[in-house]
Amino acid sequence: MPLSDTFIRQAKYSGAKAGDKHSDGGGMYLLVNAAGKYWRMNYRFLGKQKTLALGVYPAVTLAAARKGRDQARQLLAAGTDPSAAKQEDALEVRRAAGALFEAAAREWMISTASQRSPETHKRVVNWFERDVLPHIGQSPIGDLRPRDILSVMKRMQARGTIESSHRVLGYISRVFRMAMVAELVDRDPTVGVGDALKKPVVKHFASITEPERVGPLLRAIHAYDGHAITCAAIKFAPLVFQRPHMIREAEWTEISLDSAEWRIAGSKMKMENDHIVPLARQAVEILRDVKKITGEGRYVFASLRPGRPMSENTINAALRNLGYDGDTMVGHGFRAMARTILDEVLGERVDLIEHQLAHTVKDANGRAYNRTAHLPARREMMQRWADYLDQLRLGTEAAPPRAA
């Protein structure tokens, strides 16, 4: 028997676990449960029993629900699945609502923010706000072509930001890849754009790589009378030779003094892979002293401003105060120092050095090693390196302790 408006209005939930179903005919029924009243339609398509949602009462009236049922039956008669048609209609609505590039870009920035450090996320947002969105933000994302993206990139390069333009191009590509998954676009128009851009000039960081010059540098570092956290950071840097931003953003939750390890999540790494840094005895001693000062906080090398790591310029500023200018030695230069001396002087295995530099190292089959690869051997290498630095600093080095 067909339903009436009065019956629907007065229908109460009986408490049945599956809810109460009141048929209106043609497969359509009113489902009443504790949450409300819902229009549903049962049908068969390609031999399978399916259910179509027609709306929620009273937002969808009895007349509107019947109209939806009739339309669904027409689709079935034409050989079309009503549920699939409804999903396609919903997709078109989503496409229309999020059609602008700006909407997709902001959604990507929000959804991926946790994968970047706060400082990196701020730079990404600033790049989009200043260099991207003002030019293509209000364009329908599906209408953008390679020439539109190239125009944005060339504006950036005209300011001299060659390297940054390539980074931003990569971020724009990620926006389009997310949009492809959401079926807002069919292709990524950034493909090939990088080939038409100026390539960044590879710039090597200033570094001291001769053992006879490393000794005086280390003596100056150990005699530095700056702030205690700065002194600790600049002593710690050559022992671990990680990127400066990783050192300044090191967190106590990543450090295990008992097992002498620093475990860094892939979300913080340049190559996005988890990384383990074995800590030599000398590095652990530095961290134990620092923990007395910053151990109650988040960051190992904390800023004087609560809740923040030390400034990205702290280590370089300390080197400047010690008399080493930017053309002689920078914080990033400790990596080149270790890479050169470990290989050419101490004779350490190149693959172990590359692991410790957090570079991708692949096996004979082209597969990248995981973060724990050769950990015992790397631990021994890091201790030999720390001992050798002590010899250089104290002026007691004899024949280099070459690796076995």
Image: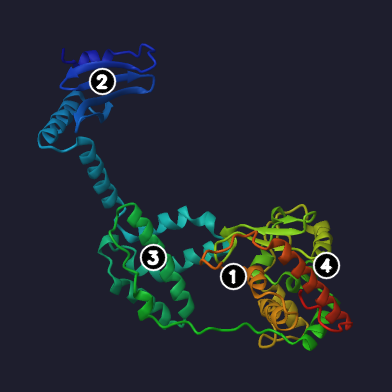
Q: Could you tell me the amino acid type at mark 4?
A: Gln
Name the disc covering residue 282, or none: 4
What label sits on residue 30 in the rendered view? 2
User: Dot 3 corresponds to which residue?
Assistant: 173
- Dot 2 surroundings within 10 Å: few (below 14), some, or many (20 or more)? many
* Amino acid on which disc 1 is placed: His
Nearer to me, 346 or 99: 346
- Residue type at mark 2: give it: Leu
The residues bearing labels 3 and 1 have C-alpha atoms spaced at a distance of 24 Å
Q: Could you say where residue 168 lies in the image, as x and y percent from the top left? A: 44, 70
Q: Earlier in the sequence, mark 4 or mark 1?
A: 4
Q: Residues within 10 Å of mark 4 (few under 14, many from 20)?
A: some
Report, in whole angstroms, how far the alpha carbon at label 3 lies from the one at label 2: 46 Å
Helix or strand or loop: what does disc 1 sit on? Answer: loop
Marks 3 and 4, how far apart in space?
Answer: 44 Å
Q: Which circle's residue, 3 or 1, is located before the other in the chain?
A: 3
Local secondary structure at mark 4:
helix
Crowding near pointer 3: few (<14 within 10 Å), some, many (20+)?
some
- Residue 233 in view, yes or no: no
Above or below, 252 relative to 18: below
Q: Earlier in the sequence, mark 3 or mark 4?
A: 3
